[in-house]
Amino acid sequence: MALIRVASILLVSLFLAACSPDYNWRQVAVGEGAVMAFFPEKPVTQSRNLQFSGHDIAFGLTSAKVGDALFTVAYAPLPVAVRNDEALSHEFAKAVMQSLYRNMGVAEPDTLPALGAPFDINGQSPQGDMRLRATVWLSRGALIEGLVMATPDEFPEPQAEQFFQGLEVAR
């Protein structure tokens, strides 16, 4: 009887391993150490410059893909003029959140989520239906985002939770 149970457990384990992406968690410093993140695979960093209210803002995206799921930390150091203007830095954070809704083809809610609070958006991308979980922070002169995106039926709920729990933003 014990042999049958062991064989059944082994069979189920092999089945699950074959059906699920391989997660190989690693801790990575993002934004020159402003954020510590656990990525489920080796991440790649890209950057681009954005214009906001007459200011150039360098926006770095550090992402890892496992299966169809994309795990991203975005880091944007704020120019001194934006950093020293609390209303302007909050306006930038609001604009970033609004862009997440627009990019998913969804109308933004009347009240945007609070900074630091996770929120989900179910919308569209060029690949079809998508689910995005995001959190946006303002901290030490920078805007930081944690993002997980995947198709709704493939959204890696436990791994997304692990990813967000592993994000440490310097205060």
Image (spheres, rainbow, N blue to C red):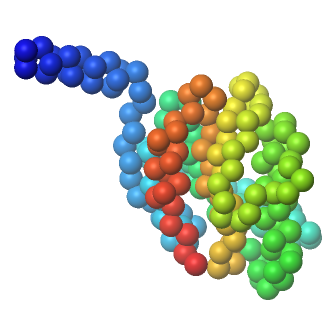
Q: Nearer the viewer, residue 113 or 37?
A: 113
Residue under the point 55% across and 75% down: 170
Q: Is residue 8 left or right of residue 159?
A: left
Q: Is residue 130 left or right of residue 15?
A: right
State which quarter of the image contains the C terminus: bottom right
Residue under the point 39% across and 53% down: 26
Q: Could you tell me residue 1's position as x and y percent?
A: 7, 15
Q: Nearer the viewer, residue 64 or 19?
A: 19
The residue sitting at the front extreme is 1
Q: Could you tell me residue 162's position as x and y percent?
A: 46, 50
| On screen, residue 11 above or below 147 | above
Q: Could you tell me residue 118's position as x and y percent?
A: 65, 54
Q: Quadrant of residue 106?
A: top right
Q: Is residue 3 left or right of residue 36?
A: left
Q: Nearer the viewer, residue 26 or 161?
A: 161
Residue under the point 88% across and 42% down: 107
Q: Quadrant of residue 91?
A: bottom right
Does residue 76 appear in this view?
Answer: no
Q: Nearer the viewer, residue 82 or 93?
A: 93
Residue under the point 40% across and 21% down: 19
Does residue 84 appear in this view?
Answer: yes
The residue sitting at the bottom extreme is 84
Q: Could you tell me residue 104's position as x and y percent?
A: 79, 38
